[in-house]
Amino acid sequence: MTFLNRASFADGADHGATQHPSRKPECTKTPSALSSVGGRLSATSAWLCALSQHLCLMKTGFTESGKVIASFAKLVTFLSGDRKYLFSRCEFEFASTTLGDFDQIVSTNALVGAFEDLNVRLTKYKPVHCKARNLHDQFRGLLHEDIRRSCLPIGIETFDGDLAAFFIVDDAECLVIKPWDAEILTVESASLNQYKNQVSAVMVELENQKRSLTPDLL
């Protein structure tokens, strides 16, 4: 079976059909737009005010020979209104769908810890070989048996319920993903090494954002 950049699979579904579930509305506001919004909010929305005044934004992607082949991580880190605490928002953007809840605000240190755990798991990670017709059952069985086989950050609200794992399906390496509210699996053409590099880039950027926002606290 030949794989394109993405495809979708579901029990009893036509494997030739492509479906792209929409998980959450995309945040389309730029930092400057967020700044103007934050200025109009009341004190009860202190975190948005902090976001408009003390914000770092990252958006990166898989690259191959200088060409972006898949959008990947969006990351924002900001100070609380009293400048004592750091919070972050994060999501992974793929060609077919999004993983992670960008509206979910989490402690930056907690997110750092989740990515550090993921990085350790990825050092020992090996894609699972399977046939396309068995993909749904093997994906479900793999992660039901051990959630640490997921190649997403775990133990953090941002990615709560989302699942992803690398497979080699009919000799093609791919990332199989399932947003928490989707009934189908989506297959992205991506290599494990590419993914590891991007996770490392997110970790570096998280530390950079922390230092730029709180140089006197770190």
Image: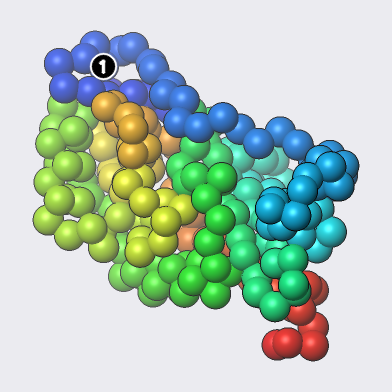
Relative image position of residue 198 (x, y in whole percent) = 56, 57
Q: What amino acid is found at the position of numbered circle 1 in the picture?
A: His
Does residue 212 lie above or below 151 as drawn? below
Farthest residue to the front: give it. 43
Quadrant location, the C terminus = bottom right
Q: Is residue 165 visible?
A: yes
Q: Is residue 204 left or right of residue 129?
A: right
Quadrant location, the N terminus = top left
Q: In which quarter of the image is residue 20?
A: top left
Does residue 207 lie above or below 4 as drawn? below
Q: Is residue 92 left or right of residue 4?
A: right
Relative image position of residue 130 (x, y in whole percent) = 18, 40
Element at label 1: loop
Q: Quadrant of residue 145?
A: bottom left
Residue carrying label 1: 15
Relative image position of residue 135 (x, y in whole percent) = 19, 34
Q: Is residue 5 visible?
A: no
Relative image position of residue 15 (x, y in whole percent) = 26, 16
Label 1 Cα neighbours within 10 Å, binned few <14 / some 14-19 / many ≥20: some
**Could you tell me which residue is drawn at 40 percent across and 72 percent down?**
117
